Amino acid sequence: MKALDRRTLLRGVLGGAAVSIALPPLEAMMNGNGTAWAGGEAFPKRFGVYFWGNGVLPDRWNPTGEGTTWTPSPILMPLASLRDRLTVVSGTRVATLNTVPHGSGPAGLLSGDNEVNGSFTRPSLDQLVASAVGSETRFRSLETGVQRSDGSYSYAGPQQRNPIESDPRALFNRLFGEGFRAPGETSTPDPRLALRRSVLDAVTGQGTSLRQRLGANDRRRLEEHLDGVRAIERQLQRLEENPPSLAACRRPDAPPAEIPDVLGRPDMRARAQAMANLLAMALACDLTRVFFHMYSQPVNNTLFANAPAGHHQLTHDEPGAQPQVFAILQLIMGDLALFLEALRAVPEGDGTLLDHTLVLCTSDCSFGRTHALDEYPIVLAGGRSMGLRGNTHLRARGENASKVSYSILQMMGVRAADFGVGAGRVTEGLGGLLT
């Protein structure tokens, strides 16, 4: 059987106009194992962060046992059905300064530096990955959330926070509304796209001429601006191209216009499920390969089901073993399981979308009451095609959490000599993560 190029189209004439139809992935397009395209191209690598606020309860977070002979902890029990796709990393510490409650931890883990003036000083981990793999997709990265908010720990640079979209219907319209074509769908290209792209090309040319007349600081600002222009050009180019021939890609059903509260409390489960379905299909359709998903904000006082007070208030005020905080954490892990199951439900080659997606699951501190940065909560999910071991509890025993971030860069193929600065800087990954 002769191999077919995965971009092969069916071409013909309809009503005097040329038409083309994209094909789904066929065996002739893949290698003999069905694990990659016949031309040697592997399925895309994806990376995302799944973040929740207000930390954990470390004494009931860490699993028992190590290596592959581990048992999920009480808080992690909702993830038990996914244990073969999980690597739980315990015992790391964020080595940067702990000066900003709920802010120092994310800054240290995700940028390798301190939080300064309410901002990261460097691009966040997701944006470092997006700089390497995001140019091939319509959206360089997606920033989404479940709790109603626009806050994010995704930073393109100092004071350049990427806001999140927490409205499922608005996210659906952005991803699958105007401009989206599923494999097999035909449409007439918008003639305005070519004009808009030609205008952008002209702007880029003028910028090149202008650069020669500017000082160093202005040149840097101009480069940041032109990077944004190039990102728009790539989006327009993706709109003009045929959609990817990915078997599981389809236009999902639109979520309801509004997900109502239940007894005055946000329906976090319904919102989490809607966002999970949309993000999974965005990845399956190769609309993006990088995401930052804020399940809940730090210092959030979300009223979870049956809780007598807000989440953040309970982490500080609930006495004893904090049973209400424990119940909330189990609810959050249940919603994380929904998200990972949505990825695992999408077949890709001889595996699933989850196998080709590396997800960093974490929070803003370890023990919420004290804002501690040791025993930092880290779970790595999926990532089998990147070599992540899976079905493992890795006990790090005080190592710098930045090593996990550096390992992620390595797994995603990002060339970097180090990660972080000062106390957060590392030049090697965390041993034991890879097969």
Image: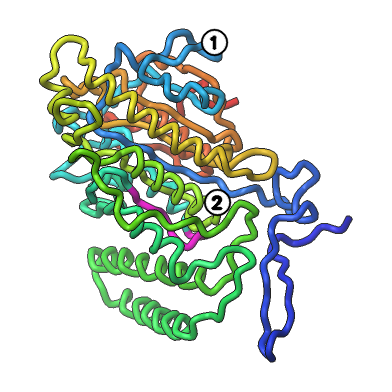
Q: Amino acid at mark 2?
A: Ala
Can you say whether 280 is above or below 73 in the image? Answer: below
Q: Nearer the viewer, residue 368 or 251?
A: 251
Q: Nearer the viewer, residue 102 or 271?
A: 271
Circle number at residue 284:
2
Can you say whether 188 is above or below 82 in the image? Answer: below
Report whether 186 appears left or right of 30: left
Ranked by sequence position, the earlier of labels 1 and 2 is: 1
Report whether 24 appears left or right of 405: right
How far apart are labels 1 and 2 at the CA level? 33 Å
Q: Quadrant of residue 372?
A: top left
Q: Position of residue 405 (x, y in %)?
A: 40, 34
Give the residues in magenta. 135-144
Q: Position of residue 37 (x, y in %)?
A: 71, 52
Q: Quadrant of residue 421?
A: top left
Q: Amino acid at mark 1?
A: Thr
Of the 4 image quadrants, the one containing the C terminus is top right
Q: Secondary structure at mark 1?
A: loop
| Residue that carries the numbered disc 1 in the rendered image | 69
